[in-house]
Amino acid sequence: MNFITRCLIIGVLAINVGSTMSQVRSSAETDAARWTDDIAPMVEAIRQEYKLPAMAAAVVRSDGIVSAAATGVKRADRPETVDVNSRFHVGSVAKSMTATMIASLVEHGIVKWSLTPQEAFPKIAEQIHPSLRSITLEQLLTHRAGIQPFEDDAEFEKLPLFKGSPTDMRRQFAEFLLRRGATSPVGEHIYSNAGYGLAGAMVESVTGKSWETLMRDYLFTPLGLRTAGFGWPARDHANEPWGHWARQSGFEPHSPKDKYIVHKIIAPAGDVYMSILDYAKYAQAHLAGLNGRGSVVSPETFEKLHKPFGDYALGWNRQVINNLPASTHSGSAGTFYAGILVYPKKNLAVVIFINAAGNGSDTARNKLFSQLLKKYKALE
């Protein structure tokens, strides 16, 4: 498994949009938002150019969704098409979601940003390696806690077998990490999926609730993200899109029921799915928060979530576009690809999904970002 987590590279890339299509939207999923599907030709042109199975995108202002579209098929070997209510896997974009959920816990007075492993796991406090006794929840969420990355299969293959529920496994993994000690200097930025797994285990220990329950209670439900869930979307919902592996011959459908999953021990780092409309609602919450309108957390807390330590904030990369700050993240566990860009000074956010990774999917995503920013005059 390899989580693709680089900053989005935004450039002005021109393409010829030669096709047209329409999208039928579901009023049950759009609420009162007034949006169009006029980005559909652009999405479809890029999808066809890179031979992607499916692609979805939405453009957002602080007061709602401006435009949304989804084109292509749920599986490369079948004709069933996606729509704006189809669910896609978000990969490492879920890091910002976990951080936002924890920020809500902080605002509710349930945990503190300064929470340490010793406080979260008092029964093993004396067994925690000295290098990790004083790391904080905030350091974990900014990748500055000295935790091993756990970005590829080889790292997972060396782990002991963890058993029980996802919460049980995350606690066992946390204890393993904490007893072993830091693998890089605490305070230095080392991107770590395991650090988010440890953060999830810490808040589970303090609250007595699973990370999954906390995400539903403090993020999904308050924001009305009705399509959000965990794991591969088609594992829970038979008619949802499959992810696709990149092969020399093209994209090969990945069965959501095979053995390949995002390991539960690092689920807080990247194992969430939702529709493009709900993804847009999530982006809207952050855009509105950065422009002074709180929702699931206060505007001040949204500002904290996006304030970078170097180039990385609490689940967000910091990027500068035309001399203005933007928050971005991309995510992939190898079979889907997701991207998010929040550009507060332009009052614009863009979200993109692809049900495949590799074979130019990252280039396609960046091209679509550039085209959408240009279309909505955010590059002027």
Image (cartoon, helix red, strand yellow):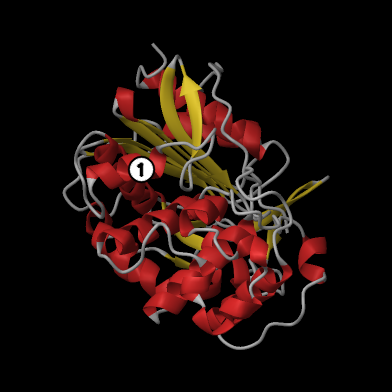
For the residue marked with disc 1, what is the amino acid?
Lys
Q: Which residue lies under the disc numbered 1?
A: 304
**Residue 192 at x, y percent in the picture:** 64, 53
Residue 345 relative to residue 51: left or right? left
**Label 1 element class:** helix
Instruction: Out of 165 and 350, give the one closest to the viewer.
Output: 165
Residue 114 versus residue 13 in the image, above or below = below
Name the image quarter holding residue 16: top right
**Residue 224 at x, y percent in the picture:** 26, 60
> Residue at 70% of width from left, 65% of height from top?
181
**Residue 258 at x, y percent in the picture:** 70, 74
Say which quadrant the C terminus sits in: top left
Q: Residue furthest top?
A: 380
> Residue at 72% of width from left, 51% of height from top?
184
Say which quadrant the N terminus sits in: bottom right
> Residue at 44% of width from left, 15% of height from top?
323
Instruction: Out of 366 and 202, give the one closest to the viewer.
Output: 202
| Residue 278 visible in the snapshot | yes
Residue 316 versus residue 236 in the image, above or below = above
Instruction: Out of 118 and 365, give the one closest to the viewer.
Output: 118
Instruction: Out of 271 and 278, give the one closest to the viewer.
Output: 271
Q: Residues within 10 Å of mark 1 (few under 14, many from 20)?
A: some
Q: Residue furthest left?
A: 32
